[in-house]
Image (cartoon, grey):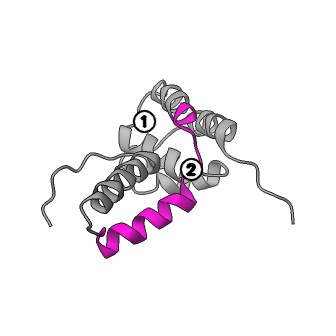
């Protein structure tokens, strides 16, 4: 397998790419590779945000100074529940986010994060 690009993307974008590949492969009577099939199945169950939500949330997150693209994508893909989970995501980063930025991120993510069902 040849690596063509290493641009970070959202789960939605990855799902769209693999779905398109799957359709093209069906037309050519081919199958996706094992890893691609597993990834596509995972993304079908894990992708929960609409493209509209992704775009608006990305725009809001990009207004936060010091937040890099790969960090915004991680936030969109994982949708952390609270400030503690956001801190965990940023543990290995060289730059520490201030408390107010983390609070701001949590508010933005909470707007699009699906509510958990009570047991």
Q: Element under label 1?
A: loop
Position in image of residue 100 (x %, y %): 60, 33
10 Å neighbourhood of mark 1: few (<14), some, or many (≥20)? some
> Which dot marks residue 86?
2
Position in image of residue 9 (x %, y %): 36, 46
Image quadrant for the C terminus? bottom right
Q: Is residue 83 left or right of residue 59?
A: right
Image quadrant for the N terminus? bottom left
Residue at x 32%, y 62% (from the top left corner):
26
Looking at the image, the residue that sits furthest to the bottom is 34
Q: Is residue 52 left or right of residue 11?
A: right
Q: Are marks 1 and 2 in contact (CB under 8 Å)?
A: no
Question: What type of secondary structure mainly makes up the magenta span?
Answer: helix
Magenta residue span? 31-54
Residue at x 57%, y 39% (from the top left corner):
50
Residue at x 62%, y 34% (from the top left corner):
108
Q: Nearer the viewer, residue 27 or 82?
A: 27
């Amino acid at each position: 397998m040849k690596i063509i690009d290493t641009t970070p993307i959202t789960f939605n974008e990855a799902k769209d790419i693999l779905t398109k590949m799957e359709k093209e492969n069906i037309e050519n009577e081919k199958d996706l590779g094992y890893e691609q099939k597993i990834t596509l199945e995972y993304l079908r169950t894990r992708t929960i945000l609409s493209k509209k939500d992704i775009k608006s949330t990305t725009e809001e997150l990009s207004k936060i100074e010091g937040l890099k693209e790969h960090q915004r994508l991680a936030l969109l893909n994982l949708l952390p529940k609270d400030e503690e989970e956001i801190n965990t995501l940023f543990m290995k980063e060289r730059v520490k986010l201030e408390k107010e930025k983390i609070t701001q991120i949590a508010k933005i993510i909470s707007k699009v994060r699906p509510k958990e069902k009570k047991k």
